[in-house]
Image: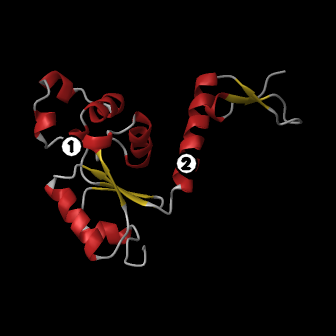
Amino acid sequence: MTGDSGVFGLERISAQSGVPRVTDVSQVTFVSGLLRRLNRVKKMSNETKMYGISNCDTIKKARNWMEKNGINYVFHDYKVSGITKDKLEEWVMQVGWEPLLNKRGTTFKKLPDMVKENVNEDSAIMLMQENPSMIKRPVLEHGDELVVGFKASDYETAGLTARNG
């Protein structure tokens, strides 16, 4: 008995039973990994975390703004702790790779033209993991919000206020 093709490689065996049958294991694996990551994000949604490099001028401005407004946060320094591929993939799912990849920095500009001209999602993730200075700074996780770069108005829109303490 065959059924209708469904989403993510699942196929209904019959309209009566409604039991899905796996037809593409790789897609199911992807979806289960995505659900695990989303659950991890929800568990940590009360924590505000800033990612960047401590000696970056933009990071200094963002940290000063956070402290001036009495906002508690955790700082993750890429140069000290690195960044995982899973974290980068999570961010890319939220905002795309283009806003995360800092193409204006010297690290990106020093890449061979062939690499720069052919950047896609996978290569951007690889480049950012290998060279965290290629990640636009700061990246701020606050609840379900992800803010890339620093503008006080963006932080306020994300719900950052002095009551977050």
Q: Quadrant of the N terminus?
A: top right
Q: Quadrant of the C terminus?
A: bottom left
Against 40, residue 64 (above or below) is: below
Residue holding disc 2: 40
Residue at the spot 19% in from the left edge and 28% down from the top edge: 117
How are the colours assigned in the image?
Answer: secondary structure
Against 110, residue 65 (above or below) is: below
Asked which quadrant contains residue 6, the reply is: top right
Separation of disc 1 and disc 2 at Cα? 26 Å
Which of pointers 1 and 2 lies earlier in the amino acid sequence? Answer: 2
Against 59, residue 16 (above or below) is: above
Against 148, residue 85 (above or below) is: above
Mark 2 Cα-neighbour bin, 10 Å: few <14, some 14–19, many ≥20? few
In the image, what residue type sits under mark 2? Arg
> Residue 13 in the image: x percent, y percent?
81, 28
Q: Report helix, strand or loop for mark 2.
A: helix
Mark 1 Cα-neighbour bin, 10 Å: few <14, some 14–19, many ≥20? many
Q: Can residue 17 be spotted in the picture?
A: yes
- Tally of numbered tags: 2
Residue holding disc 1: 102
Residue at the spot 21% in from the left edge and 52% down from the top edge: 54
Q: Give the side of residue 101 with respect to residue 91, left or right.
A: left
Residue at the spot 51% in from the left edge and 56% down from the top edge: 44
Q: Give the side of residue 105 with respect to residue 33, left or right.
A: left
> Residue 156 in the image: x percent, y percent?
34, 72
Q: Can residue 4 be spotted in the picture?
A: no
Residue at the spot 37% in from the left edge and 78% down from the top edge: 162
Q: Nearer the viewer, residue 5 or 78?
A: 78
Q: Report helix, strand or loop for mark 1.
A: loop
Q: Circles 1 and 2: CB distance less than 8 Å?
A: no
For the residues carrying marks 1 and 2, which lies nearer the camera in this image? 2
